Structure formats: structure tokens, C-alpha cells
Image (spheres, rainbow, N blue to C red):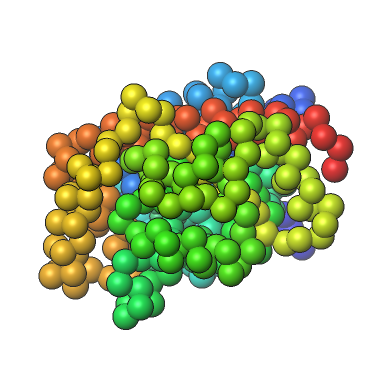
């Protein structure tokens, strides 16, 4: 069988030199952040990984090819394209076999990272159990992916648009380690503290790398969710963001938004309702996650497999 992905030159060079790699998703660029800032932010995330001495591999499907690492031109084209598909686990094979272009979610990026031998992945927030899931059944495929694909995902917890207690319950049922970094509380994306205890806590990249390897040694499938709190100077207090979340949720319900469209719709509305503050916080936390992911990737490079 042919290798089902293509490495960018930067990724090839990193492999040749033994530079640690960090996977980055592309749905955050196409569906998670507003135009036109999304391109600048995508570049900043990559730069943050490089500044730590690792190499970024932004992942996307371009013209039916699974790209591990994008050139500057490819990144710009993706960030400015209209109507790019949002590809999760269910969509990946159809997109590749029909020559489509699409951005990969956390789930699809994990699948691609594993294929490419990349063990660490940085993003902003993961998908989870949506509020009202008891009637909508809306549970992100990201949670099931974490249970079966051995990639450590660094996120700032899960967004307040989700039902966080139910999200943690599903992760527990699926056997996914949820590890808060440097604190006991599970962080809630824009805020450092969700009011819920994190199931696990580790205080640095070295320990996170060690637990990644130990899971593999135990023969356990699946990855780890590293919940890295937003830097204190960038956080939005819970009460403040909750108002925007509540408004956005009721608007989404009134308009009958469902399926894949829910998360992008809510993010866009919350950005408008907070007058851009939610996106400012999003930038700070994703850069913070890129930094930690690069450090974990470097530590993994020092532990024998
Ligand atoms: N949460 C964010 N920003 C994002 C996403 C989630 O704060 O951009 C994106 C990620 O790509 C994630 C996806 O994997 O949304 C989840 O979508 P769904 O809930 O439809 O599975
Ligand atoms: Mn969903």
C-alpha cells in the first residue's frame, strides 16, 4: 500500500535531523477563528513551536492529499478559502478518495499524526459533550478518538459551550487520562478554573512525556488529554464568558443549528458578543499550548520507546 500522507519539506528535514515534531490541527484555522486574523494566528502557533526547538506539522487535506506540514502558500490558501470542509474521523476517507480539500478536527488530526508517527499535538479546545446532549445526542468524535489513538493532545480544557461534567464522565468511561497541568482544577478554556476537579494532575512536560510512554508500555490504546490552563493575564472570568455563552446557545437553538455547524457557529457568535475578547484569549491559550506541546515532544525524544 502506498503511504497515505505527504510530509512538507520542513517535516522531512526535522525527521532527518531528529528534531521533535508537534502536530497542529487546521479546523481551528478554518472554522474556529475569524478571518482574516486566522492566518496570522496560524503562523504564530507554528512560530511558537519552532521557538521551542521543535518543528510544527499543521495537518490538512488538500486536493485529496493528506498533508503533514503545510507550506506558507498552502497555509495561506487554506486560511482564506471559503467553504472548506470540516473533516472528522467519519469524513477523512471520503475526502481523500474524492480529491476534496478540508480542515482536520482534533479527531482527524490525531489519526493523521499517528499515521505520520507524531506523538504530540497542540490545539485550543477539544470537542466534547454538548449541553442538551441528553436530547441532541451531540457528543464530539474527539472523545472517542482520544480513547483509541495514541497521541497526547494539549488543550486548554474544554470550552464553556460544552457540558463539562458530562464531558469528563465520557472521558472517564473511555479510559482517557485527563491531566491538568500545575493545578488541581480542570481548566475551562477561557478561564483557568471550571469549578470541577481534574481527574489527574502533573506539573511539567517531563512527567507528561513519561506517562505517555508508560501507557504504551502497558499496551493501552488511546492518548492523553493534557489540560493546560490559559495564562492568568489572558483569562476571562467564568461569570463574564457565561453570559455570552448563554446568549449564543439560545440563538443556535432558535436557528436550528445542528451537527458540525454547532461549534463554529457558537465560537463566531461568542467572538462578536465579547467584542473580540474571546479570540484574544484563544490566541494566548493556543500559543501556551504550542509551547508545552513542543516541550513534551522534546522530552519524548529523550525517553527510549
Ligand atoms: N473547540 C474550540 N475551537 C475549535 C474546535 C473546538 O475551541 O476550533 C474545533 C476542533 O477542530 C474540534 C472540533 O476538534 O471543533 C470539534 O467539532 P465537533 O464538536 O463538531 O466534533
Ligand atoms: Mn457534534
Q: Please, is residue 183 above or below residue 134 in the view?
A: above
Q: Tell me if residue 62 can be seen.
A: no
**Residue 239 visible (yes or no):** yes
User: The N terminus appears in which quarter of the rendering?
Assistant: bottom right
> Would you place residue 288 above or below residue 146 in this image?
above
Q: Is residue 287 left or right of residue 275?
A: right
- Classify the position of the C terminus by image quarter: top right
Location of ligand 1 given as a quarter of the image: bottom left
Rendered residue at 82%/57% (across/down): 218
Q: Position of residue 27 (x, y in %)?
A: 41, 50
For residue 198, side relative to residue 43 (left or right)? right
Instruction: Please tell me which residue lies in front, 38 or 291.
Output: 291
Where residue 238 sits: x, y (%)?
Answer: 27, 44
- Residue drawn at (23%, 68%), measured in percent from left and top? 257
Relative to 225, 299 lies left or right: right
Q: Nearer the viewer, residue 197 or 80?
A: 197
Residue 297 in percent (x, y) is at 68, 34
Q: Taking 23 as reference, is 185 left or right? A: left
Q: Position of residue 64 (x, y in %)?
A: 52, 57
At a point 48% along the width and 50% down the height, the residue shown is: 197
Amino acid at each position: 500500500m502506498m503511504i497515505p500522507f505527504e510530509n512538507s519539506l520542513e517535516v522531512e528535514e526535522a525527521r532527518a535531523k531528529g528534531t521533535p515534531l508537534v502536530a497542529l490541527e487546521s479546523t481551528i484555522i478554518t472554522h474556529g477563528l475569524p478571518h482574516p486574523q486566522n492566518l496570522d494566528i496560524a503562523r504564530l502557533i507554528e512560530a511558537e513551536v519552532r521557538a521551542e526547538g521543535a518543528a510544527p506539522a499543521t495537518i490538512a487535506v488538500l486536493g485529496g492529499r493528506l498533508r503533514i506540514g503545510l507550506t506558507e502558500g498552502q497555509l495561506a490558501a487554506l486560511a482564506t478559502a471559503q467553504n472548506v470542509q470540516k473533516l472528522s474521523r467519519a469524513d477523512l476517507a471520503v475526502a481523500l478518495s474524492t480529491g476534496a480539500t478540508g480542515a482536520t478536527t482534533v479527531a482527524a488530526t490525531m489519526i493523521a499524526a499517528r499515521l505520520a508517527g507524531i506523538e504530540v499535538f497542540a490545539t485550543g479546545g477539544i470537542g466534547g459533550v454538548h449541553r442538551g446532549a441528553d436530547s441532541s445526542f451531540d457528543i464530539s468524535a474527539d472523545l472517542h478518538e482520544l480513547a483509541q489513538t495514541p497521541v497526547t493532545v494539549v488543550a486548554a480544557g474544554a470550552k464553556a459551550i460544552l457540558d463539562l461534567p458530562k464531558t469528563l464522565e465520557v472521558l472517564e468511561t473511555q479510559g482517557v487520562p485527563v491531566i491538568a497541568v500545575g493545578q488541581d482544577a480542570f481548566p475551562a478554556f477561557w478561564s483557568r478554573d471550571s469549578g470541577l476537579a481534574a481527574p489527574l494532575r502533573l506539573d511539567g512536560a517531563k512527567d507528561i512525556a513519561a506517562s505517555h510512554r508508560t501507557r504504551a508500555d502497558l499496551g493501552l490504546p488511546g492518548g492523553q488529554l493534557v489540560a493546560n490552563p490559559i495564562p492568568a493575564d489572558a483569562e476571562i472570568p467564568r461569570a463574564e464568558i457565561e453570559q455570552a455563552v448563554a446568549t449564543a446557545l439560545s440563538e443556535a437553538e432558535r436557528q436550528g443549528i445542528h451537527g458540525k455547524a454547532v461549534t463554529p457557529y457558537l465560537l463566531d457568535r461568542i467572538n462578536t458578543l465579547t467584542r473580540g475578547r474571546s479570540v484574544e484569549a484563544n490566541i494566548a491559550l493556543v500559543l501556551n499550548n504550542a509551547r508545552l506541546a513542543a516541550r513534551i515532544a522534546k522530552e519524548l525524544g529523550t525517553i527510549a520507546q
